[in-house]
């Protein structure tokens, strides 16, 4: 299938994100395998297949909880992805996977709700709705054929999210959004005329891969602060003295280091 340059750039971004989630899932599985009673097994190479065996039964038989609520396959995948954003949450994910195997989704529900800001009844936060609206305005629309191909490539990039049902019937989630997108793809290779810029990129960020940060710093003609670690975002977290100093130097004095690196 021929993709336009604009669609190819948009699709590449999506696939790189899913590849990042798979990398973090593999890292989590490797850490889990070193402990006792890991639900993903003792062989990290088999962790994705083991997870699929635990997750896929929820396609036909969701887990009941609360007052008539159902914890579905999609809920499971969303909860695991939410937890992958921070290494400190990984043990809670694996415990939640073990609990799901026993019929209890509460641990993973708590992770998903904390991430999205939702309450136990599903209300309270609009993270999902806002993300959906922004995506529909930013991303190029897919034709049905492109949507099928994107789903196939997504499952290849992140097999832990593959339900095993194939890609047939995939459609763009924004197909009926009432306003057309205002996409900026493909982005320019260089942006000139900017003041000093600082890009912070974490090596193990599952959602915004490190290489994307490297590319952005080059595009802006600015400086890059590489942070060695496994999580998403750090500048405003206040959890790293090294990052705090770099951010303060930039915001207060517009001072950056040409070769800066921190470790979480």
Image: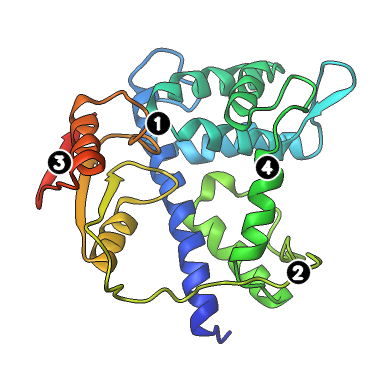
Residue 163 in sight here: no
Residue 25 in sight here: yes
Q: Is residue 94 above or below residue 127?
A: above
Residue to which mark 4 is pinned: 128
Q: Is residue 217 above or below residue 232?
A: below
Nearest-to-viewer mark from 1 and 2:
2
Separation of residues labelled 4 and 2 (CA atoms): 18 Å
**Which of the two discs, 1 and 2, labels the residue nearer the N terminus?**
1
Lateral position of residue 230 relative to residue 38, left or right: left
Query: In which quadrant of the rendered view does residue 237 lie?
Result: top left
Residue at 83%, 16% in the rendered image: 66
Lateral position of residue 123 relative to residue 5, left or right: right
Disc ID at residue 28 = 1
**Which of the two discs, 1 and 4, labels the residue nearer the N terminus?**
1
Q: Is residue 179 above or below residue 246?
A: below
Q: Is residue 176 above or below residue 263?
A: below
**Scheme of colours in the image:** rainbow
Separation of residues labelled 1 and 2 (CA atoms): 39 Å
Lateral position of residue 102 relative to residue 155, left or right: right
Separation of residues labelled 1 and 4 (CA atoms): 25 Å
């Amino acid at each position: 299938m021929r993709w336009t340059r604009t669609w190819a750039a948009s699709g590449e971004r999506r696939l790189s994100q899913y590849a990042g989630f798979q990398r973090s899932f593999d890292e989590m599985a490797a850490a889990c395998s070193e402990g006792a009673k890991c639900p993903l097994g003792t062989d990290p190479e088999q962790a994705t297949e083991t997870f699929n065996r635990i997750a896929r039964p929820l396609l036909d038989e969701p887990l009941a909880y609360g007052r008539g609520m159902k914890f579905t396959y999609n809920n499971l995948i969303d909860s695991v992805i939410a937890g992958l954003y921070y290494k400190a949450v990984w043990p809670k994910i694996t415990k939640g996977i073990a609990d799901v195997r026993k019929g209890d989704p509460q641990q993973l529900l708590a992770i998903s709700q904390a991430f999205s800001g939702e309450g136990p009844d599903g209300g309270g936060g609009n993270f999902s709705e806002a993300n959906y609206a922004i995506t529909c305005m930013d991303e190029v629309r897919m034709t049905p054929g492109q949507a099928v191909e994107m789903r196939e490539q997504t499952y290849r990039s992140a097999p832990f999210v593959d339900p095993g049902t194939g890609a047939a019937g995939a459609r763009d989630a924004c197909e009926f959004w009432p306003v057309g997108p205002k996409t900026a793809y493909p982005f320019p290779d260089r942006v000139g005329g900017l003041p000093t810029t600082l890009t912070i990129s974490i090596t193990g960020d599952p959602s915004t891969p490190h290489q994307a940060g490297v590319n952005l710093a080059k595009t802006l003609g600015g400086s890059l602060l590489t942070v060695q670690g496994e999580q998403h975002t750090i500048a405003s977290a206040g959890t790293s003295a090294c990052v705090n100093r770099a951010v303060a130097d930039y915001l207060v004095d517009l001072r950056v280091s040409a070769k800066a690196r921190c470790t979480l």
